[in-house]
Amino acid sequence: MTSEQWSAAVRLLWGPPAKPARGPKRGLTLEGIALAGVGIADAEGLGGVSMQRVAAELAVTKMALYRYVPGKAELVALMVEAALPDPAGLDAGLAAAAARAASAGGGWREQLGVWARGLYEGFRAHPWLLEATVGARVMGPRELGWMERALAALDGCGLSGAEAMDSVVLVAGHVRGIAEQERAMAGGGGGAGGEGPDAQLVVMLGEVLRARGDDYPALAAALGSVAEQGGQEQALLYGLERILDGLGLLVERRGR
């Protein structure tokens, strides 16, 4: 984003409801504009979104749209804010997780688990968010609300501010990685569906290993175990549990 785009995005995300910069009122709202963009991105991916496409979706001219949103960068910022689940929807689950484990250090682990699964579902619902939420950009109230709740879960664990932030980034990075893999397996762009990435990988590797299994005995044995005992589609939860195990050791050290 340029400095002008940055300032415009701040105004749109954090300022009072926008009025058209000039010309007659067209009955547009920032929410309606953002949701139109979200609908296009859900169907076609972020690359399908343009000011022209959104204007056509809303049955207005592109110039009318520019009276509310200066350009695509600011439009995408609004779309992210509209597409992210409201973090307030996590609050009941976070409170229940904290209550269940209150005797075991405040329930930070359970709360981060609820948070991570909620974030994952958000990426599954709108896979283009993976592309739209990278790099230096302005974050809106919802996105900061997600960060706030993750950091609040770690409050009282004895971590420094930097450690808490890095812990949240680590968990979010794992969630993103699994969601990105699933998006790639699904062909990108649209919504997730069909077999998960673990199952697809097993199928593809199985075809190769039936002919070349002797060259990769450890891999063949591991896949054979998966076929016999299950364990597919556990990458998200398995990785999350291992990350939280390591974080738990750090929290334990800080508490000594």
Image (spheres, rainbow, N blue to C red):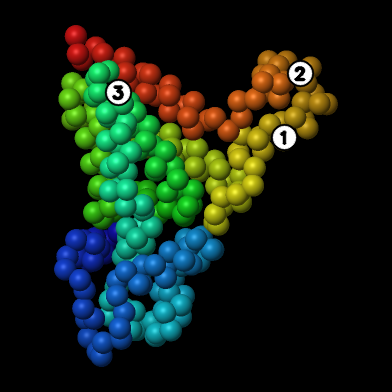
Residue bearing the label numbered 2? 215
Which is more N-terminal, label 1 or label 2?
Answer: 1
Q: Secondary structure at mark 2?
A: helix
> Can residue 219 be seen?
no
Seen in the image, is 109 located left or right of residue 38?
Answer: left
Label 3 Cα neighbours within 10 Å, binned few <14 / some 14-19 / many ≥20: some
Query: Residue 105: image x %, image y %?
Result: 24, 20
- Upstream in sequence: badge 3 or badge 2: 3
> Which is more N-terminal, label 1 or label 3?
3
Q: Amino acid at mark 2?
A: Asp
7 sits left or right of 173 in the view = left
- Residue 60 is labelled as none
Q: In this rendering, is residue 210 above or below 150? A: above
Q: Please state the horizontal and vertical placement of residue 42, each as a whole percent of the image.
A: 50, 61
Residue at far top of view? 256
Q: Residue at x 29, y 23 (%)?
A: 101
Q: Which residue sits at x=32%, y=58%?
A: 81
Q: Which mark is residue 101?
A: 3
Figure check: 183 above or below 104? below
Amino acid type at image mark 1: Val
Tell me the SS state at disc 1. Answer: helix
Q: Name above or below for residue 142 compared with residue 207.
A: below
**Residue at mark 2 to residue at mark 1: CA–CA distance:** 18 Å
Q: CA distance from mark 3 to mark 2?
A: 47 Å
Label placed on residue 203: 1
Asked whether the viewer can see residue 158, the reply is yes
In whole angstroms, how far apart are the C-alphas of marks 3 and 1?
A: 39 Å
The residue lying at 46 percent from left, 54 percent from top is 126
Residue beneath the point at 31% across and 14% down = 249
